[in-house]
Image: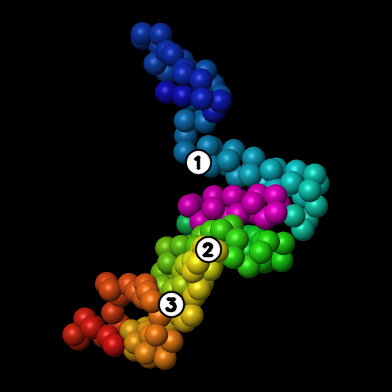
Amino acid sequence: EEDFDGEVVHEEAGDEHQARPQADALAKPGLRAIAARVLLGEALEASRHAHGADSVETATAMNNLAAFHAANGQAGSAQPLYESALALREKLLPADHPDIAASLNNLAAMHAADGRPQVAEPLYRRALTTLLAGQDGWEVVAEAADGIGAVTAAHTTQPDVVLMDLNYARDTTSGQEG
């Protein structure tokens, strides 16, 4: 087994219950989660102190703490942190920066995991649009929330490429849309 610092903890034969106290305590998932939460909170405060509240570094620390909460099923704690990180990144970075796309994707994934796909879907589309917009030679000319909108947009804009999720269908009767 490993202790919190990644050191391997060896136990003597016959002494399996005599592991170092810190390794034994941190082997319990709840205590590891508490330690991780404390450290991520301290990292956020250190970033605010070192770089200021409005910095890319602070946005990253917020995102990391939000990811912890999301991974532990705490969407209510994760959402404001993800939203604040996104707002900072949108304020400080170019509109097509991959960190903005990552923030959008993280927020979308949290909503999807929390059973809110209708909130997640537009965020996923924005994340993908942001990533594509940052690629040289690519121009995003339209996006659509459904198949009918996609067909209409494609007819209107005559794009060279259409990126579409073929597995997504709201028409549960036929499985097709547009």
Which quarter of the picture shows residue 83?
Answer: bottom right
In the image, what residue type sits under mark 3? Gln
Q: Looking at the picture, how far across and down is residue 78, in whole percent?
A: 57, 59
Q: Looking at the picture, how far across and down is residue 13, in whole percent?
A: 36, 8
Position above or below: 48 against 177: above
Few, some or many residues within 10 Å of mark 2 (<14, 14–19, 20+): few
Tell me the residue at 47%/30% (across/down).
27
Question: How far separated are the C-alphas under marks 3 and 1?
Answer: 32 Å
- Label 1 sits on a secondary structure element that is helix
Q: Which residue is mark 3?
A: 118
Taking depth in this image into account, of 25 and 9 the one nearest to the observer is: 9
Tell me the residue at 41%/8% (across/down).
12
Q: Which residues are magenta?
A: 56-72
Q: Which residue is mark 2?
A: 136
In the image, what residue type sits under mark 1? Gly
Mark in the foreground, 3 or 1: 3
Is 60 on the left or on the right of 2, as rendered? right
Taking depth in this image into account, of 98 and 83 the one nearest to the observer is: 98
Mark in the foreground, 1 or 2: 2
- As drawn, the label of residue 30 is 1
Tell me the residue at 42%/18% (across/down).
17
Query: Mark 1–mark 2 contact, CB under 8 Å?
Result: no
For the rendered model, the colour scheme is rainbow
Few, some or many residues within 10 Å of mark 3 (<14, 14–19, 20+): few
User: Where the C terminus falls, by quadrant?
Assistant: bottom left
User: Where the N terminus falls, by quadrant?
Assistant: top left
Pick whichever of labels 3 and 1 is earlier in the sequence: 1
Q: Is residue 102 visible?
A: yes
In the image, what residue type sits under mark 2? Asp
Q: Looking at the picture, how far across and down is residue 140, in whole percent?
A: 49, 75
- Outermost residue on the top side: it is 13
Few, some or many residues within 10 Å of mark 1 (<14, 14–19, 20+): few
